[in-house]
Amino acid sequence: MQNKITVYLAAIILVLTTLSNAYALQLKSPDFNDNAAIPAPFTCDGNNQAPRLHWQDIPKDTQSFALIAADPDAPAGTWYHWLVFNIPAKIHQLPSQDLTNIKIGNNSWQHKQYDGPCPPKGQTHRYIFTLYALDIPLELPNGIQASDLLLAMQNHILATATWQGTYKH
């Protein structure tokens, strides 16, 4: 009976540890509230300044992070505004002063940079910033496309966190 209880307790601890790692990662921005309007400085109506993003509660086996900012409401399908990857596990914010090993993919405008929200006139779109905690650094070059980044991350994602904003042009 003691062995069964020990096995059950070990299984419960394993499940709780897995769940806590899977759901602990948190992403935040001091520049706008989650699910709120994105201020103009971070959009095409401002100066396309990348919003500050901070994260915490990192899964213990994290080796790197990737960040994708996307507009799922774009008329032609998901439009990517920012692809950043190989962010070292020691870094917990973007923009960061430490750019060592950080790589940038091409956004949907084919720019290796952040380009802010710019929906068609009169439309409100959602902009989702997704942070991925990865168990490896990715062996990919600068300038990759979102589809290549997403494919390379498969089977290496320890946790994700999102921060969402809206913008009407």
Image (cartoon, helix red, strand yellow):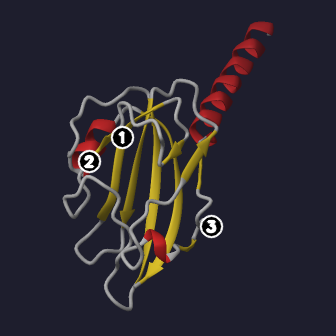
Front residue (pair 164, 14): 164
Q: Amino acid at mark 3?
A: Asn
The residue that disc 2 covers is 105
Please, what secondary structure does the residue beneath circle 1 have?
strand
Residue visible at 19% across and 59% down in the picture: 110
The spot of residue 104 in percent (x, y) is 30, 45
Q: Earlier in the sequence, mark 3 or mark 1?
A: 3
Q: Earlier in the sequence, mark 1 or mark 2?
A: 1
Look at the picture and state if 153 lies above or below 130. above
The spot of residue 31 in percent (x, y) is 58, 64
Residue visible at 22% across and 57% down in the picture: 111
The residue that disc 3 covers is 33
Q: CA distance from mark 3 to mark 1?
A: 24 Å
Q: CA distance from mark 2 to mark 3?
A: 26 Å
Please, what secondary structure does the residue beneath circle 3 have?
loop
Q: CA distance from mark 1 to mark 2?
A: 8 Å
Badge 2 local density, few (<14 within 10 Å), some, or many (20+)? many
Count the labels in the image.
Answer: 3
Relative side of 120 to 13, left or right: left
Look at the picture and state if 80 lies above or below 117. above
Image quadrant in which the N terminus is located: top right
Q: Are marks 1 and 2 in contact (CB under 8 Å)?
A: yes
Q: Amino acid at mark 2?
A: Gly
Residue visible at 36% across and 33% down in the picture: 155
Relative side of 127 to 18, left or right: left
The residue that disc 1 covers is 85
The spot of residue 18 in percent (x, y) is 60, 30
Front residue (pair 7, 50): 50
